[in-house]
Image (cartoon, rainbow, N blue to C red):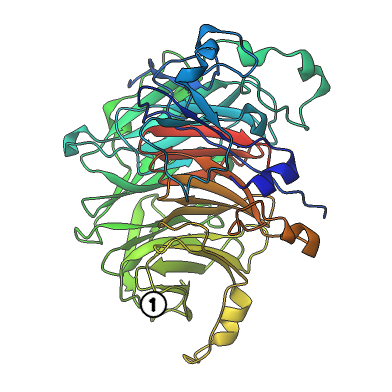
Amino acid sequence: MSKRSADAAGVPDAKTHKSEAPQESRVAPDGLEFEDDFEDEFESEGEVEEYNSDDDDDVMVAGADGLPDADDDTPAKKEGDEMEVDNQVFIPSRHKLGKDEILEPDPSVYHMLHTLNVNWPCLSFDIIPDDLGDERRTYPASVYLVTGTQASKPKENEIMVLKLSGLNKMKGGARDDDEEEEDDDDDSDTEDDPILESRSLPTNSVTNRIRMNPNAKQTGEYLAASMAENGDAYIWDLTPHYRSFDSPGTTINKAQKLPKATIKSHRGVEGYGLDWSPLIQSGALLTGDNSGKIYLTTRSQSGGWKTDENAFKGHTGSIEEIQWSPTEQFVFASGSSDGTVKIWDTRSKKRKAQLSVDVSSSDINVMSWNKRVDFLLATGADDGVWGVWDLRKVAELGSNPSANVTPIASFNFHKEPITSIEFHPTEDSVVQVCSADNTITLWDLSVELDDEESKDTGGVEDIPPQLLFCHYMKDVKEAHWQKQMPGVVVATGGDGFGVWKSISV
């Protein structure tokens, strides 16, 4: 991370250790901060691992390397000629570790840090809204997830409903300023290890993307939709699976493990675009495929699901992302490998885009609609560039193909494809970004440096002042904010899942 930035926030630099034996699987995060004034059925299938600087267990994905603290007078420390500590600036997206180097997480920049392994990698997941309350800041914490696997054989794939419980504060980590005073004497960070419980719904295809219906809590019906590698889309009722975690002895029958509906309108064409309407409680689902077609599926009066076979057409490339407007019931946006973002109205019988803007010369991989400022849309592209667009300016473009619309913010900090992007649920200027460079970065677009601050580059000139935090995660694919737990991020990558909270947000 940037020494200039880290010093400004009072955050120590990352430490790079050199050891005799390579430990390539152990990589850990570092962060920085800027100031801003203004088994199925009911058995536990695994355990969540918590970072512990005194534990040298090899299962740690997030990077516990078992190295002693600087003040620890242990035999390992006395063998000083066998291990060197390099306090130089290390930026995961810029620098590479040597074969005998590892990164160690700095506990002072995390409130919480956990990792968990599952049987197969998961390309996509979503957070299940729960009944435990909003604005939760106490520990231990619990998180509910739904995900789909990428197994080596099609028949081994499954949709998994997960409960992560007993998530404690990081040992030696920072204290949350919003924690209750009585929590000062709490020793929850030394309690038993967290537990992972799971429920399984079999599926015969890799899940490319999966999304929860955001109206689940309001309706009491916990619906999820998934796009499969085989070209089909599925709607799942996760209500009995979610409820079973708190009702020991509940039996889930075979029928409850089957999808409630299968969407075959894509006719075997694989796809990734998928989103539920946040404003239509009865259920409205958009699905997009690699042929550039988008279909709308809604619930019929009989309670079943019906897909309008009149597809939305206009993209010349694959549909990579779909986002419903958070405020306009009939409006949605789509991002494509053709480099454009298009705005649609589902009431249009012609099924043609109302607006279109050229965003990138490469694929538009992901998008996020700001939930609090409804004219802001963030995009992430295959060339590593991400930006934020003012849709009012896009609307001014109208049908004039020669007009040039530019983003209100654009960053090329990442040099590999952007794999996930999401606005903070309550802080309209905060964005989290995942990249194929193995990092998750947090940004605050409201931050600006004055002239004096900008002169102190700390030897690293390409660190934007808006960058708040950088977290390392191998092969990260997707990340989401846990909306009911302020500042908590959940992510999936090549080595499993991570749950963490930094001091930055």
At x 61% / y 35%, what residue is drawn?
501
Task: Name the residue type under label 1.
Answer: Arg
Q: Nearer the viewer, residue 22 or 431?
A: 22
At x 67% / y 63%, what residue is drawn?
373
Q: Is residue 355 above or below residue 193?
A: below
Q: Residues within 10 Å of mark 1 (few under 14, many from 20)?
A: some
* 339 lies left or right of 428: left
Residue 454, quarter of the rendered image: bottom right
Q: Is residue 122 above or below residue 36?
A: above
Give percent across and percent down for residue 113.
56, 28
Give percent across and percent down for residue 273.
37, 59
Q: Is residue 448 visible?
A: no
* 241 lies left or right of 291: right
Q: Nearer the viewer, residue 443 or 99?
A: 99
Give percent across and percent down for residue 128.
50, 37
Give percent across and percent down for residue 291.
26, 68
Q: Is residue 265 above or below residue 173?
A: below
At x 68% / y 50%, what residue is drawn?
426
Residue 223, quarter of the rendered image: top left
In the rendered image, which quarter contains the N terminus? top right
Q: How many marks?
A: 1
* 105 lies left or right of 454: left
* 166 lies left or right of 362: right
In the rendered image, which quarter contains the C terminus? top right
Kindly state the secondary structure of the residue where label 1 is placed.
Answer: loop
Q: Nearer the viewer, residue 226 or 96?
A: 96
At x 42% / y 24%, what residue is drawn?
19
Residue designated by label 1: 351
Q: Is residue 310 visible?
A: yes
